[in-house]
Image (cartoon, grey):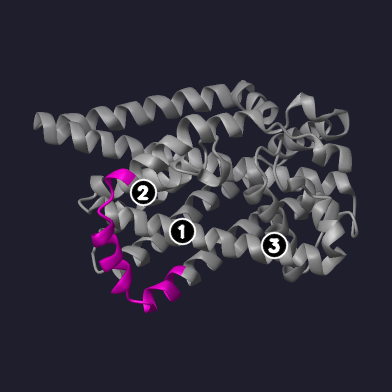
Amino acid sequence: MRELMADRSLSPVLIGSLLIGLPLLLLVIWTTDWSQAWDILRTYEAVYLLWFAGFAVANLACYTLVWAWFLALEGERLSWTRMWNYRMAGGAVSYVTPGPRIGGELTRADLFSEHGSWRVGLSTSVGEKVVLFLSGVVFDTVVVLSVISGVLAALYNGTVLITALSVVALIGAGVIVARSVSEQGVLRRLVNVVVPESIGEQVGNVKEDLWRYVTSYPWIVGLAVVFGIGSKMLIAAQFYALVLGAGFHVSFWEACVLAAALDIAYSIPSYMGLGSLEGGQALATSLVGLSSSVGVIIAVLARVRDLIMSGYGILFLIWRGGVNALFEQF
């Protein structure tokens, strides 16, 4: 286990942080009206932070439920408290460690091994990751295409035509994906991306379990993906509350744009979304008619949320095994 946890590649994340994250962060710092940002923060309505926190907890509960479904496929059951804490611990390792091969799923597997098979813990954790990855791809694609069609419609005054073309493009993409899935091509490649060969044979065998989930329980996995897409709406609800707290208003769909920007920012190879989170929110708020200062405040609050949740996971690891157990995860 320790050798697998040590098998981490820092280069892609460090390169991404230096070439993408840091320049974006410097650009945001340079272009932000900090006096306006301070005024927004000073007059922020704290009650909306409670709504933000509530939606964040509900979102994590949805993710934990997806993991519970995969555990049920293996005939395993854990108390909700254990699942929640194990997942939070794994999420903390994923967030604060640059470049983990498959993130905190290894940590979750290690914790789960006290109750069952280490391989089952890893397979179900990675299965949840695949579902949430697919959910994010669908959600982000729909939002991005909608934004592009809206911009094109405004530029060329062809709302109906642009919308029709977007619908056709979505249907075409759906047909292509469905055909690829039926041929088992996309899913095979997805499994190979999530569990690289380089991390070792023992972990590589988890691919067999992932493929078994897809082929033996396609409807359950499909429903989990749909559920995952729905859980993205809770992220949009978080941003909706954050904007209201800043004294502004957006539609729920515009909040989905902010949520997609967050999702995409954390997909860019950069340490803790450095720069990409701030830059993405500054751009997204501009697209929905708000100032970039609002985007910076939202990004700061979102980062504070993530740091608090990571702190919870780290404290749980320390409580379970002490500081030495924590260091073994990094």
Q: What residue is drawn where x is 78% and y is 25%?
A: 198
**Residue 61 appearing in the image:** no
Tell whether label 2 touches label 1 (CB within 8 Å). yes
Q: Quadrant of residue 10?
A: top right
Query: 224 or 117: which is nearer to us?
Result: 117
Residue 141: x, y in percent? 40, 36
For label 2, the crowd category at 10 Å Cα-Cα, with few meaning under 14, some 14 to 19 and many 20 or more, is many
Mark 1 and mark 2: Cα distance apart in space: 10 Å
Q: Which residue is mark 3?
A: 313
Specify the farthest residue to the bottom.
Answer: 47
Q: Which residue is mark 1?
A: 302
Q: What residue is drawn where x is 74% and y is 47%?
A: 105
Residue type (three-letter) at the residue carrying disc 1: Ala
1 or 2: tag closer to the N-terminus: 2
Query: 41 or 115: which is nearer to us?
Result: 41
Q: Which residue is mark 2?
A: 281
Q: Quadrant of residue 48?
A: bottom left
**Residue 28 appearing in the image:** yes
The residue stretch that appears in magenta: 30-52
Residue type (three-letter) at the residue carrying disc 3: Gly
